[in-house]
Amino acid sequence: MSSTATSDAPVVRPVDRLEVLFGELGELMGQRNAIDGRIVDIVAEMDHDNLVGITGARSIAALVAWKTGSSARNAAKVATIAHRLPQFPRCAQGMREGWLSLDQVGIIAEKAGEGSDEHYAALARCATVSQLGTALKAEPPLEPEPDPWSNTDPDPDCAPPPEPERPPSITKTHSDE
């Protein structure tokens, strides 16, 4: 049996097919962004309730990489967003609703200053990750957070003893003149 094309079969133009594919891609990315938003919420709960210590993981980022099978870089991005979630509620909501990506919110959480949530949530709606990176370069650098595992507040009882004072000395120089 041979197959023949009939003249009444619809012809799909490449531009129409591309439009359908772009629509499906947009829908899938929105779902992915919403899933990433939920992952960030879960990680934020573990981070803010200090649940990492009972897992044996050395950091929240290491825990995320371990449990999600993601790269260290991607896990660090999720951990950073989760840690700063209270400072960026609009950006986080945009990710949960699917209109902001993990990469967009990640670069904002990594580099934006406190109080800039509203500004960057609006900007990110129409900016690429690269454009956000360029805009964030104008921001003053963030103060590094203290490492919660290191003892930054020295205990006065454990402080090293002060160095003894050096005895005074006299130096004598002479020349031929």
Image (cartoon, helix red, strand yellow):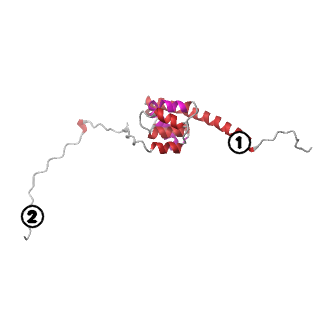
Compared to residue 132, the image places residue 170 above or below, namely below
* Residue 16 covered by magenta stretch: no
* Residue 76 covered by magenta stretch: yes
Question: Tag 2: Cα neighbours inside 10 Å, few (<14), some, or many (≥20)?
Answer: few
Viewer-proximal residue among 50 and 14: 14
**Amino acid type at mark 2:** Thr
Residue 137: image location, x then y, percent: 44, 45
For the residues carrying marks 1 and 2, which lies nearer the camera in this image? Answer: 1
Element type at mark 1: helix
Residue 95: image location, x then y, percent: 55, 33
Residue lying at 9% horizontally and 59% vertically, measured from the top left: 171
Magenta region: 70-94
Q: Which mark is residue 173?
A: 2
The residue singled out by tag 1 in the image is: 18
Q: Main secondary structure of the magenta part?
A: helix
Question: Label 1 to label 2, Cα distance in Å?
Answer: 89 Å
Element type at mark 2: loop
Residue lying at 46% horizontally and 37% vertically, measured from the top left: 80
- Residue 26 showing in the rendered view: yes
Residue lying at 43% horizontally and 44% vertically, measured from the top left: 138
Q: Quadrant of the C terminus?
A: bottom left
Residue 140 in which image quadrant: top left
Does 161 sit left or right of 170 as displayed? right
